[in-house]
Image (cartoon, helix red, strand yellow):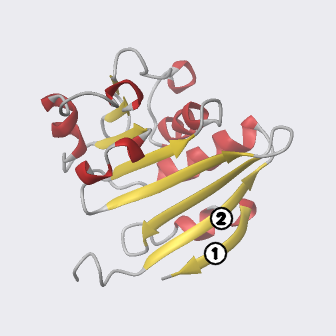
Amino acid sequence: MSPTAETMTTLELQSNSADDTLAIGREIGAALPPGLFVALNGELGSGKTVLVKGIAHGLGVPGWAGLRSPTFTLMLSYHGGRCVLHHVDFYRLNEAPGLPGEIEDCMFSSDQICIVEWADIWPETWPKQHLTIHIRAGEDKRRNISIEFPEALLPGLASALEKWTVSPSSA
């Protein structure tokens, strides 16, 4: 099936707290197959790194609670879970002439997971098969989280996230 013919599912979720965001991330991490690229977008302070901590937890990464944003290092890698997790941040690469080779390699790995914060800076670099997440800050501690993914790659994700779902749809 070609990427354009795939059924894409979009979920609109609401997180009412950092704990909810962690739990949502944990469910996503438990469902992710190795080799999937995750494009993660949201303004500063929206909870991107909290979500990645949850994903790491769902992947079984030891020390997931100590995970930090790779803003200044560009990429941090975590081993010991179901597969290697690469956490990348494009924020400081906005004006760079190109992606560093090691980042590009992890984005296209078939046996690792690569999550890129601020991925919208370079959407043309994304692999065809990917999961896209947008986080928007709402009132109080609420976050609106939009997830778009190929249904065939993550068949149980929608039901795992049902508790937080505001609106599911398929395209």
State which quadrant residue 95 falls in.
top left
**Res 77 label:** none
Q: CA distance from mark 2 to mark 1?
A: 6 Å
How many badges with numbers are in the image? Answer: 2
Asked which secondary structure carries label 1, the reply is strand
Q: Residue at x 25, y 63 (%)?
A: 128
Q: Amino acid at mark 2?
A: Glu
- Tell me where residue 112 appears, x and y as whole percent: 26, 42
47 relative to 154 in the view: left or right: right
Foreground pick, 127 / 92 = 92
Q: Residue at x 44, y 41 (%)?
A: 59
Residue linked to disc 1: 168
Foreground pick, 56 / 80 = 56
Asked which secondary structure carries label 2, the reply is strand
Q: Are marks 2 and 1 in contact (CB under 8 Å)?
A: yes
Above or below 106: residue 154 = below
